[in-house]
């Protein structure tokens, strides 16, 4: 059983749902980024999505776009993110997912990316703009038991297409809660619940829901209908608004604890 499978099995045993946290690696600079992520892991984060900064993050809203710009300005590159991942792995056993657009991986080299990611202790990758039909070049040599390919399911995806995507995935599925970009407002949990139900009919993989999740109430509501909740823009907004604070890692850790508390039961005391 790999780290992702073990995490979901343990959470099910404890009657909790996964808190999946996204931050852009290298934001606001590589060292402070490491301190922030370490604080999140120590505060109870279940799965880390470590974003690879990209100059044209088309699926992301302004908050994450600006975080990518700051990370690139601080000279964060994929090789440095591999080093950060290896450094984190020495301190935490939680799954680490490398979250990227395809262009940085293609430029780095598909084989090199896989080999170094596995060696660093990463557990999988989510490639935002790479559909199954165009994935063969990247994943031809991947061992999904060692390094999972996390797939996105859009809210407009028909059920048969859901199955096609799920059959080519491992680890868990990331269900996008709504159309639009990350960080956009408005979350209709009743609609999301129907999407989760349709997806469960075609896959046994855990389902985590993201996009538009910003409050503990959002987390608690989505925890009742899914296996996990993904939060990204809310963390990056906190980083941006407190970027010069020496207490920034502790602030992000405190917010992680608040979100994690909301995953622990449908009756979470918020």
Image: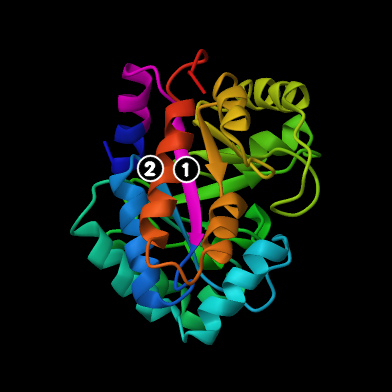
**Which residue is identified by label 2?**
45
Density class for disc 1 (Cα within 10 Å; few <14, some 14-19, many ≥20) is many
Cβ atoms at labels 2 and 1 below 8 Å apart: yes
Name the quadrant containing residue 16: top left
* Residue in the picture at 63% in, 20% down: 201
* Residue in the picture at 48% in, 48% down: 21
Name the quadrant containing residue 159: top right
**Which residue is identified by label 1?**
20
Helix, strand or loop at disc 2? loop
Q: Which of 97 and 41 is in front in this view?
A: 41
Checking the image for residue 197, the label placed there is none
Whether 61 is among the magenta residues is: no
Density class for disc 2 (Cα within 10 Å; few <14, some 14-19, many ≥20) is many
Q: Which of 212 and 225 is in front in this view?
A: 212
Work out how far the residue at label 2 is from the one at label 1, CA to CA, in angstroms.
7 Å
The first of marks 2 and 1 along the sequence is 1
**Residue placed furthest toward the left:** 90
Compared to residue 162, the image places residue 185 above or below, namely below
Residue 254: % across, % down: 40, 45
Color encoding of the figure: rainbow
Compared to residue 66, the image places residue 262 above or below, namely above
Residue 224: % across, % down: 57, 19
């Amino acid at each position: 059983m790999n780290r992702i499978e073990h995490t979901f099995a343990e959470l099910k045993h404890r009657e909790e749902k996964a808190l999946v946290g996204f931050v852009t690696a290298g934001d606001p600079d590589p060292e402070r980024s490491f301190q922030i992520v370490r604080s999140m892991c120590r505060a109870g984060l279940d799965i880390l999505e470590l974003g690879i900064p990209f100059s044209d993050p088309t699926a992301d809203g302004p908050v994450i776009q600006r975080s990518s710009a700051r990370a690139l300005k601080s000279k964060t590159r994929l090789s440095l993110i591999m080093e950060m991942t290896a450094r984190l792995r020495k301190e935490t056993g939680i799954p680490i997912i490398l979250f990227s657009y395809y262009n940085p991986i293609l430029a780095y080299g598909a084989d090199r990316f896989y080999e170094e990611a596995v060696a660093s202790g990463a557990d999988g990758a989510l490639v935002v703009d790479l559909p199954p039909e165009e994935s063969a070049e990247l994943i031809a040599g991947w061992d999904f038991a060692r390094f999972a390919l996390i797939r996105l399911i859009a809210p407009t995806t028909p059920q048969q297409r859901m199955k096609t995507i799920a059959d080519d995935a491992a680890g868990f599925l990331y269900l996008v809660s709504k159309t639009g970009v990350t960080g956009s407002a408005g979350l209709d949990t009743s609609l999301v619940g129907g999407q989760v139900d349709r997806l469960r009919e075609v896959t046994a993989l855990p389902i985590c829901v993201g996009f538009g999740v910003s409050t503990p109430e959002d987390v608690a509501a989505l925890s009742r209908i899914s296996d996990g909740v993904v939060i990204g823009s809310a963390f990056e907004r906190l980083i941006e608004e407190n970027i010069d604070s020496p207490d920034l890692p502790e602030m992000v850790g405190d917010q992680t604890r608040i979100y994690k508390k909301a995953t622990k039961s449908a009756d979470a005391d918020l």
